[in-house]
Image (spheres, grey):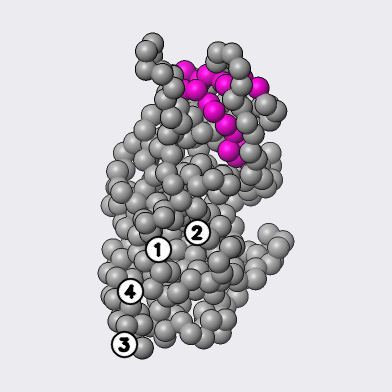
Amino acid sequence: MSPSLATNQALDGAVLRADLTGCGGPKHIAAPENRTAATEPLRLGPWLLDSLLAEGTLTRVYRARTIATKGEGQLPAQYVVKVLREVWHDHPVGLARMRQEALVGRCVANRYLAPILSVHVHRPPFYVVLPWLKGVSVAAHLATRGRLEASLALWIARQAAQALEALHAAGYVHGDVNPRNLLLAPDGHVTLLDLSCSHRVGDAPERSDSTLAVRPLLGTPNYLAPEIFIGKQANPRSDLYSLGFTLFEMLAGRLLHMPGEMAALKAFKREGILPSVRAIAPQVPHEVADLVRELTARDPLRRPHSAREVVHRCMRLEIATLRQRVLV
């Protein structure tokens, strides 16, 4: 798949590619739905949807461009439009998640967070617009190249922590930090994606109901903090746990084996003990393994106090690991 901010890594369903370009002018529609075959470009307000990038239970994601005015010629597809599927237009959970994403994305600006450029969430069709950014998800990078050197893993974790620092300072929890939601650009810049699970600190987020059986908890279950599985609200340290689990995966080169059944996963989160990352990747420095252990502590009070603390610790460890490589 070509590099993009196309949040296929943040969606529930399988990634699809479809060529939606064709002859003739754009077709005006209420909302793009059931479009998997080649057809004419779709128009959604001022946006021309060029290609379907991904689809999930709630949304479809398109690469898009603005509609050129007379005399401008063909404009490049430099945007991503995330559209709520029509079946969810009258459903409180799906609509609330898109509106929350729009709200947080417009309220919190940070170079490590995917910006929301435009929103249309007051009436159908419901959608948000993001920039098209080059890169691959950290999950895809791990799938093709395996585990990361400690310095690179810390570089990625530090930038993700900087995004979390901005969110937490504004009073929000991200709620779904995982390798699929981290976009790694060719120059090493990291962007934290997908704010659909975010919510204000202290507020209970919208929970999925039985119609969203694929996502019984809001967020990606394997990366969620233990307190979420006993009914407590997510807090900034819950995001730090998810970041620690992500750092573990980057250093080990694979996700720690977790129970497949939700009941077993809940029991593991409540009672299980995570092994040291050095048990899988013994080359990881002790200090880095200690950071992972603290981030993934079962008790939130044993985790680092804040994302800012994680940023500074990652930075110090980045320098230390790079120095060790130079000296060797």
The answer to which of marks 4 and 2 sits earlier in the sequence is: 2
Assess whether residue 88 is covered by the magenta stretch: no
Residue at the image point whose x is 72% and y is 61% from the top: 261
Do the numbered discs 2 and 1 sit on residues whose CB atoms are within 8 Å? yes
Pointer 1 residue: 156
- The reply, left or right, for residue 270 in relation to residue 318 is right
Circle number at residue 138: 2
Q: Are marks 4 and 2 in contact (CB under 8 Å)?
A: no
Which circle's residue, 3 or 2, is located before the other in the chain?
2
Residue that numbered label 3 is attached to? 327
Q: Secondary structure at mark 2?
A: helix
Magenta residues (range)? 39-59
Q: Position of residue 174 (x, y in %)?
A: 43, 51
Q: Amino acid at mark 3?
A: Leu
First in sequence: mark 2 vs mark 1: 2
Q: Out of 286 and 28, give the one closest to the viewer.
A: 28
Q: Which SS class for mark 1?
A: helix
Q: Are marks 4 and 1 in contact (CB under 8 Å)?
A: no
Pointer 4 residue? 318
136, above or below 20, in the image: below
- Give, as a three-letter code, the residue at label 2: Val
Q: Is residue 176 visible?
A: no
